[in-house]
Image: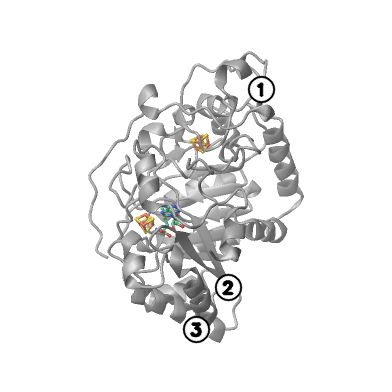
Amino acid sequence: MNSVAEKFLSKVPQYTRNRRHFSSFVTHGNVRKWANLLTVEMERKLRKVQVKGYPYILFLDPCNYCNLRCPLCATGRNDLGRKQAMLSFEHFKRYFDPFAPYLFETNMHNWGESLLNKEVYRMIEYVQSRNVGTNLSSNFVKLDSNDLDNLLDCGLEYLIASVDGTSQETYSKYRVRGNYDTVIENLSELLRRRNQRRQRTPVIEWQFILMRHNEHQIAEAQQLAKKLGVDRLRFIPVGLPYDAPNRKELANEWFPKELRGRTDSDGNEQQFAQKDKPSPCFYLYRSFVINPDGGVSPCCIVPRQHTDFANLSELTEIDVLKIYNNEYYQSGRALFGRKASQSKVKTTCDGCDIFARPPANPVIRGEVDPSDQPGGAFVPLSQIGLGPASVERSDVDA
Ligand SMILES: C[S@@+](CC[C@H](N)C(=O)[O-])C[C@H]1O[C@@H](n2cnc3c(N)ncnc32)[C@H](O)[C@@H]1O
Ligand code: SF4
Ligand code: SF4
């Protein structure tokens, strides 16, 4: 199998864009932000439960509606567990402002197709004007000529186009309702206009999720990426719904057969904190996730409203550190701590095995060094009363 992709997929952590992050640390940095970055990283290393560092990466979702129906995405499966909403510019600004002084980047997407919210360009412009970089991931299906120009005018720094295949057949097996030719045309036209303007941004990444049905198209994707002139082609491993009860079954259906990197040798799904490198969940130290309804999720992996850690729409004043140190965040971080947790609150993090943590009892008694422990303790969500939920969804045409 293709050695470039194999090499890439064997790297950890697999979802981070290190080159992109490095560039925004430089471009959007200042003394206050860098000092905060050091504090955050130190606190994570020391497994602090209460923190002084501010989150430096924000996810602010402009909308959680989507035109596609990707079968492993909570929105695509109509299994978001949250009311769908379009974020207004006024709410966006109210949520963004308190975080701005410490941010290097804001992700202008999370659980929907952000380009369906026509205010998104104004939001991006605003974020950039506050010296914070912007990233946006899109399925790139539903765009018109104005959208293409707006993407070039608004100052967006990094665009991720989600295209998982090199033919309609493979592409639409995951991007259900999507049209492959339309996406490639949109991408090609954006590149043409950007190059005509001699503009360097947005950097355009073609993101290709490797799955069983498209893993044979790696070489073709590489050729087409070159022909199109995208700045980066990035293969990423396929993730499964966080709380799906049938993950093994889904893994058999979707995980690549030939490529390794997402699974261990015994066939188990391999997550961010691989066996030889256990470390506390980085989301609970570095990032902050705001949904269009103002709900705060602990990370971009869990969508459900009933697992939220706060709701900004209910607050008259947003005190970032007060929220970041509330009982939910502290409870989440305590799961990775070296000492017994005093927290009585259980959160969705209790049922999460994405980041390895020591088996609870010995660590809570302080008998075992967490860094010696392989794997993570997985408590099924059903055991802590946090099962899947579903809400009605309004339809959006493809
Ligand atoms: C939920 S989507 C929202 C943004 C946009 N609708 C899109 O698809 O690009 C956020 C990111 O998750 C990626 N994604 C979707 N399904 C995935 C899966 N099963 N495994 C890994 N990443 C996935 C998307 O490609 C996108 O980059
Ligand atoms: S396009 Fe993005 S948001 Fe829409 S269903 Fe697919 S992964 Fe989810
Ligand atoms: S659910 Fe898992 S990945 Fe998300 S914040 Fe909690 S521990 Fe981290």
Residue on which disc 1 sits:
338
* Quarter assignment of residue 302: top left
> Closest to the observer: 281 or 307?
281
Q: Earlier in the sequence, mark 3 or mark 1?
A: 3
Name which residue type carries label 2.
Answer: Asp
**x and y percent of residue 187 in the render?**
45, 75
What residue does disc 2 label?
231
Q: Residues within 10 Å of mark 1 (few under 14, many from 20)?
A: many
Q: Which mark is residue 220?
A: none
Distance from label 3 to label 1 (Cα)? Answer: 53 Å
CB contact under 8 Å: marks 2 and 3? no
Q: Residue at x 24, y 63 (%)?
A: 397
Establish whether ligand 3 lies closer than 8 Å to the Cβ of label 1. Answer: no
According to the image, label 3 marks what residue?
192
Tell me if residue 366 can be seen. yes
Q: CA distance from mark 2 to mark 3?
A: 13 Å
Relative horizontal placement of residue 30, taking residue 340 as reference (left or right): right
The residue type indicated by label 3 comes to: Arg
